[in-house]
Image: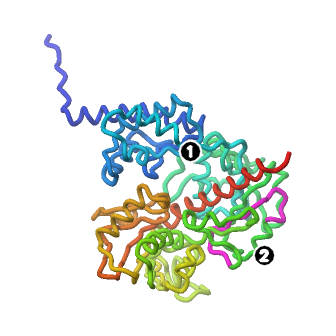
Amino acid sequence: MASATVPAVDSAHQAWLDRVALAESAVPIIGRLYRERDVVTHVHGKQLVNQSPIEILKAHKWARRVGERVLSIEDSMAVLRLVDELGIRGVSLDLGLLLGDAPESGLEDWARERVAELPSWEQDQPTDVVLYGFGRIGRLLARILIGHAGRGLGLRLRAIVVRRGGENDLEKRASLLRRDSVHGAFQGTIEIDREANTILANGTLIQVIYSDDPSSVDYTQHGIEHAIVVDNTGKWRDEAGLAQHLECPGVDRVVLTAPGKSPLKNVVFGVNHETIGADDRIVTAASCTTNAITPVLKVINDAYGIEHGHVETVHSYTNDQNLIDNFHKGARRGRSAALNMVLTETGAAKAVSKALPELEGKLTGNAIRVPTPNVSMAILNLSLEQAVERDAVNELLRRTSLTGELRAQIDFTDSAEVVSSDFVGNNRAGIVDGLATIASGKHLVLYVWYDNEFGYSSQVIRVIEHMADQMAKARQLAPA
C-alpha cells in the first residue's frame, strides 16, 4: 500500500507559522515578567500582557506600519529573553520605542546596554482604591484595575460603593461587570459571595458597600487604609461636596471623574498632572473631551502657536439622555438619543485652559450628540500664528504618538477605511485622523477620534497611579 504524501507548506504560510510559534513562546515570558517582576510589556502603547499570540503579532504588524523600523517578533524575543536573564523589575517595556533605533547588526550587545538603562520602580505596598459609583466609567475603571493588578503591589481595587437596587443587587452588579454591550465580555472569571457581599474577579476581592451618604462609610472596618476614592457619580463637583469622602475613616484622597469647580484642579494627565501637589487631597480628571483635545492642542500650540479656535464635538449619547422623548431639565436633551442628532453645549473648550492656561479665552465649543453608544470625535478648527503644511503637521503628530512625551495620550491613524467602532477600547486620550487633516496658510483643521469611555478611563487610571506614587514616596520620607 502506497504511503500518503504530505503536501508541502508554501513559504509564506510557513513563515507565518514560524512567527506564530515565536509569539507563542513569548506569551509565558511576558506573563511571568508581569506576575513576578511587575514588567509591563507593550508596543507603542499596545499592551502585550494577557494577549494571544495572534494579538502579539498584530501589535508588531501595526508597529511596522507606523514606526521608523521594521519591528520583528524575533527582535522582541531577544529583548524579552534579556530582560528575563538580567532580572529586570518594575519597568514599562515598550518594545517599539526600545527597538525603534536598533542597529541592523550586533543587536544583543546593543539591547543588553539599553535594557540595563531602563528606568525602574520598586513598590513596597499596594495603594487601596475605592470606586464610589459603578456606572459606565466605574465598571471600566474596575476592569482596568483588575487587569493591571500584577503582583498586587500597585493599585488595588478594594471596594465599590453603591445604593442598593434590590434583593439581587450583587448579582446584577457582577453581571454588568461580566458583560458589556460595547466593550465585550470580561476577560476572566467572576464569583460572588452573597453573605460577605463581595465580588471576586480574577483574584481581586472587591467589597460591595451599600450607602446613600458619602460621609457615612468606615472603610477601616473592611481593612481599607489610606485609600484613594474615585467618585464616578458626578453628583458632587465642588470641594465641599467631594470633601465628604475625606470624612470617612480610611480615605486619604479623592479623584472626581468629571470636570470640577474652582478651586479644584482639573487634571489632564500628560499635560498638567505634575501640578498635583502633596497637599491636593481632591483633584478632578476633567472630561473625556477635554482629555481628548488638550494634548493635541498643546502639541500644535507649542509648535505653531494658536491664536483662536473652535471645537465641535460629535459625541456618542450618554446615560444622561432619554431613550425616547421625555422630560429633561437640559435644553434639547429630552429628545430621543437613539433617533436624533442633538445639538447641545459643551464646556470642554473652555475647560482646556484649566490644564493649558496659555489657551485661556482662545477657544469656543459646541457639541452634537449622535445615535452611537461609544466613540466620539472632536473637530479642531484653529487659526495659527504661522503658516503650516498638512504633511508637516501630520508628521509632527505621528512622531508624537510614537516617541513624544505625550505618546500615551495621542494616537495617530492614516487609514482611509476606519470608522468610529474601530476605536472602541483604544487607551489613548485621542486619535488624530491624519487623512482628514486640512491645512491652508495659517488655518488648520484636525479631526480627533476618542473612546469617550475607555480612553478617558485610561487617563483617570494614570492620574490615580500618579497620586499613588506620590503617597508611596510620602510614606517613605515620613519618619519612623
Measured from the top left, where is residue 396 in percent x and y?
37, 65
Q: Earlier in the sequence, mark 1 or mark 2?
A: 1
Residue wearing tag 2 = 240
User: Left or right of 95: which side holds 224?
Assistant: right
User: Left or right of 283: which side holds 394?
Assistant: left
Residue at screen point 44% across, 75% down: 378
Q: Residue furthest top?
A: 1
Tag count: 2
Q: For mark 1, give the secondary structure.
A: loop
Residue at screen point 51% across, 51% down: 185
Query: Which segment did they paint magenta?
Result: 246-261
Residue 119's mark? 1
Residue at screen point 65% across, 62% down: 134
Q: Nearer the viewer, residue 453 or 181?
A: 453
In the displayed structure, would residue 9 be above or below residue 100? above
User: Where is the N terminus found, in terms of image quarters?
Assistant: top left
Q: Which amino acid type corresponds to the residue marked 2 in the rendered image?
A: Ala
Q: For mark 2, give the secondary structure.
A: helix
Measured from the top left, where is residue 147 in percent x and y?
57, 47
Measured from the top left, where is residue 124 in percent x and y?
71, 42
User: Left or right of 281: which side holds 453?
Assistant: left
Q: Which amino acid type corresponds to the residue marked 1 in the rendered image?
A: Pro
